[in-house]
Amino acid sequence: MKTEVDFSDLGLIEYGAAWQLQERLFSRIIGQKRSGVFPTDNYLLFCEHPHVYTLGKSGSESNLLLDVIQLKAKDATFYHTNRGGDITYHGPGQIVGYPVLNLEPIVNGAREYVGKMEEAIIRTLSRYGLAAERLAGATGVWLDTEFPEKTRKICAIGVRTSHWVSMHGFAFNVNTDLNYFNYINPCGFTDKAVTSLSAELRTHVNIDEVKKLLASELAEVYGLKLRELPHGLLLTD
């Protein structure tokens, strides 16, 4: 039986507000599990963020190459988060996905969970004729991994799991302004480039179309049944 998941596209939302929402849903699911509720609630959130840099709990602030005044000049904010991974950028034109799920009925551990997330991105990119891959020793989705001088990242992944419940997720560059990556060492790398779907295709991409394809692929790889919620409903729940 497929796991039922409430799916919501939050649109453009400030990073802190989306983080607070995730924490609330994350705590709700853990509380349900502790109370013996089954099946629990489950959520898949899509959104875009205003310009923001986020640093994972194991990352280094030295990978942010701007100071506070320079951040403000770029209309960007900065958050030190509780997800895994190092530093990344979020902004308009990027699909940020936050699966807040009870993982026990879905996968056998965090490694499989992240691997399937990567697989959904890879399958989505294949719909656009791009052969994306994984990179040994790193998370996320990459292009041209067999040529180190050309290797570039198109999707970053950083998650948190506790009590077999997930939060945070992925950042998939679609029409993203890649100039903002010039101000960080993306995911801690100093020798790897960043790209986007529109940069690879050399044309602006319909991001709503990509969201639909990606949601379908995520549902397929995880065995989910998505129930689309009205826009903004979870923000007032």
Image: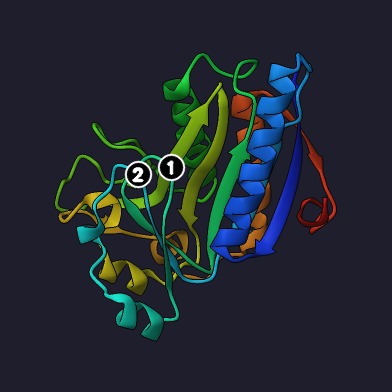
Residue 215 spot, x, y in % from top left:
66, 42
Provide residue 93's location: percent of width, then percent of height: 53, 67
Residue 98 shows in this picture: yes
Q: Amino acid at mark 1?
A: Arg
How busy is the neighbourhood of tag 1: few (under 14 within 10 Å), some, or many (20 plus)?
many
Question: In this image, 206 relative to 143: left or right?
Answer: right
**Given contact means CB atoms under 8 Å apart, are the residues at marks 2 and 1 in contact?**
yes
Residue under circle 1?
83
Q: How many residues crowd mark 2 within 10 Å: few (<14), some (14–19), many (20+)?
A: some
Q: Residue at coordinates 76% horizontally, 30% vertically from top-left?
A: 41
Residue at image point 31% right, 48% down: 86
For the rendered model, the colour scheme is rainbow
Q: Is residue 163 left or right of residue 192?
A: right
Q: Is residue 122 left or right of residue 103?
A: left
Instruction: Residue type at mark 2: give it.
Output: Lys
Q: Position of residue 20 (x, y in %)?
A: 62, 52
Q: Residue at x 55, y 56 (%)?
A: 95
Q: Nearer the viewer, residue 112 or 57?
A: 57
* Distance of label 2 from label 1 (alpha carbons): 6 Å
Which disc number belongs to residue 65?
none
Question: In the structure shown, which secondary structural element does the residue marked by tag 2 occupy?
Answer: loop
Q: Residue at x 36, y 47 (%)?
A: 56
For disc 2, the marked residue is 57
Q: Is residue 12 left or right of residue 66?
A: right
Question: Within the image, what quadrant is residue 235 found in?
Answer: bottom right
